[in-house]
Each structure stands twice: as C-alpha cells, then as structure tokens.
Image: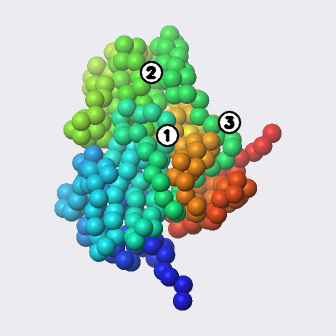
Amino acid sequence: MSREPLLRLTSAGLYCSRGGFHIDPWSPVACAVITHAHGDHAVRSSRKYLAAASGKLILQHRMGPRAQIQPLAFGEKLNLDGVEVSLHPAGHILGSAQVRVEHKGEVWVVSGDYKVAPDSTCEAFEPVKCHTFITESTFGDPHYHWAPQSVTYAAIHDWWRENQSQGRASLLYAYSLGKAQRILAGLDPSLGPVYAHPNIEQMNELYRQSGVALTATRGWNDTSLITDWPRALILMPPASRWEKGLAFHGHYATAFASGWMVLPDEPGKRGVERGFALSDHADYGELLSAVAATTAERILVTHGYIEDFVATLKSRGYDASPHKTPRCKKPPVVVRT
Ligand SMILES: [Zn+2]
C-alpha cells in the first residue's frame, strides 16, 4: 500500500491529515493555514486560522472580527500532531507567506502567491529548501518579463506629468490590497497630491497600523480634489464604474497597473488608455530561479500556465506535475509573433 502524501487535495483544499490542517482551503475547515489575505486564498468561517503575524490586521479585516487568528512570526515553528509548520516570507503582499511543512525529515513548501522583486511594503521573498515545492505559475510563460520597477515608476511619473500639463487628473487602477500600497510607496509625492478611493484607503490604513510607512493620501470625497483635479493622481480599485462619481470634476486619463499589461491588448480590454506592467507575482525567469533555489526534487505547479510551466520544468530535468484545483483559472493565451 502506498503511503499517503504529506499534503493532498481534498474537496476543501490542500490538506495535511497527519497535522489536521488545511492550507488556503476554499471551504470553512477546523484549522486553516493561510498564505495571504487575498480572496482566492482566504475564505471566512473556518474555526481557526494560522497566519503570519505581520498580516494579522489585514486578515482579521477580511475574515471578520470574530475570526480566531493565531499569528506566527516568520520562521517560528509550530508542532501540530507531530508535523512541524512554519511560515516564510513570500514577498507578495504584507504578511504573505510560504508554508513549510515537515514530518519525519520530509519537507514540503507551499509557495502561495510570490514575487521576488523588492517591495518596501512587505517582507522580502525568502527561498526555502524542501523536497517537494508547490509553486504558483501565474506568469509561467516566457512572454512575461518585468522591467526593473524603477523604469516602471519613471513611466508612471512621466504619464502623471503629461496629464498634469494637459489639465487632466490621472486615474490609476490597481488592486486594493497589496498593489495600491506598493504603488503608493514608489510614487514621488512632490509631483502632486495623491488621492485614494475608500476601498484602497481602508487597506492603506491597515498597512499603516501594521507599521508600514506610506505616503499620506487624501480621501476620495476631499473637497480639495475639486481644485487639485488637474494635478491629482487618484488610486482606484479595478472597476471602471467607480470613475463615474468623479467625472464631474473634469477631464482625466486612465491607466491600469498589473502584470497582465505586458499583453498589448490588455489596457483596451480593461477600458483604460495606458498599462503599466507592475506585478505582485514573479515573472517567468523569476519563477525558474525561485524553483531552483528550493533544491526540490519534485515540483507541483498550480495557479496559472500550469501545463506550459510543467513542460518547461520537465525539459530542465525536474520531476514536475500539475497541481490543479477548482481555483485555477485558465490564463490568457499568449500570441507569439
Ligand atoms: Zn494573492
């Protein structure tokens, strides 16, 4: 009889039966170890949560005030029925963690979402050695390569200045949790006032309360926006309906900050004029480097270009296989020219 793997997929998500816990389950469970607070990794109503201490305020906000969250410092070891569990920085958003699980010398690491580019608003990604590595592959295609972020921020600043010269406000769309704060930390506040939509400002506040220094932002309904309009940069969640409430103030330009903006037709599809390829995930080359740094013999690929990335890894000599879950969405087809 074959031995049960240390982690296996169940109807609720990835499960460790020896330790009695799930990792990022999509249904409520008894004990959920959470990699980070994004909605596709953390759901409400589990009896108990284990998560990185630095992201506790954010996770509490997302899971509700009654959720029981046990915070763990990065690297702190917890023994759950003989299984050692520890969390290690994933560099994705504040408090995002890779989960290391060890039993009788066998080590698995679940990456969650991760990025390796520097980001002053969260802990830096840390490679963790293991035997089996479950990696995400959101951008696991050679088409995805990020420019240095200094280049991307320079492009955002140029766009902002150009809009100012034309008397237009700059509406920059970005995911409320993680991306908006990273942008805020990279913006030059001397260029003009920065306003934030309430959904984003709520996250900014949680970051500030968690000890992350962020540039001061002005509120969405701040009346100074009327006079500041042509100089303002306004951070918006990615849903175009939000801008309707602002339109009466005057002309504006729109842009979206996301790794998907590498694809030429993405800005148009999202109804914006410009795209800035700034991602909270590793690009293709960074994924390959991260996998190599784990020294893992076996790689399970989830969340993204699963088949393509498995094939890439196999061609490089890895024992790689797909790890498909109901949360894995089909990524856009990359058109090769
Ligand atoms: Zn995420």
What residue did someone put label 1 on?
116
Residue situated furthest top in the rendering: 165
Q: Quadrant of the C terminus?
A: top right
**Along the polypeptide, which appears first: circle 3 or circle 2?**
2
Place of residue 316 in the rendered image (x, y in percent of width and height, measured from the top left): 70, 53
Lower position in the chain sequence, tag 3 or tag 1: 1
Closer to us: 255 or 178: 178
Does residue 320 appear to the left or right of 326 in the view shown? Answer: right
Structural distance between the alpha carbons of marks 3 and 2: 24 Å
- Residue appearing at x 46%, y 63% in the figure: 108
Q: Position of residue 255 (x, y in %)?
A: 53, 30
Q: Establish if 286 lies above or below 150.
A: below
Q: Nearer the viewer, residue 295 or 8?
A: 295
Number of other residues with Cα within 10 Å of mark 1, as a class: few under 14, some 14 to 19, many 20 or more: many
Q: CA distance from mark 1 to mark 2?
A: 32 Å
- The part of the image, by quadrant, that contains residue 39 is bottom left
| Number of numbered tags placed on the structure image | 3
Q: Is 66 placed above or below 18 here?
A: above
- Residue at the spot of label 3: 264
Numbered label attached to residue 242 = none
Residue drawn at 34 percent across, 63 percent down: 85
Residue 169: percent from the left, percent from the top? Answer: 45, 21
Viewer-side label of 3, 2: 3
Secondary structure at badge 3 equals loop
Q: CA distance from mark 3 to mark 1?
A: 24 Å
At mark 1, the secondary structure is: loop
Nearer the observer: mark 1 or 2; the answer is 1
Q: Earlier in the sequence, mark 1 or mark 2?
A: 1
Disc 2: which residue: 169
Q: Are marks 3 and 2 in contact (CB under 8 Å)?
A: no
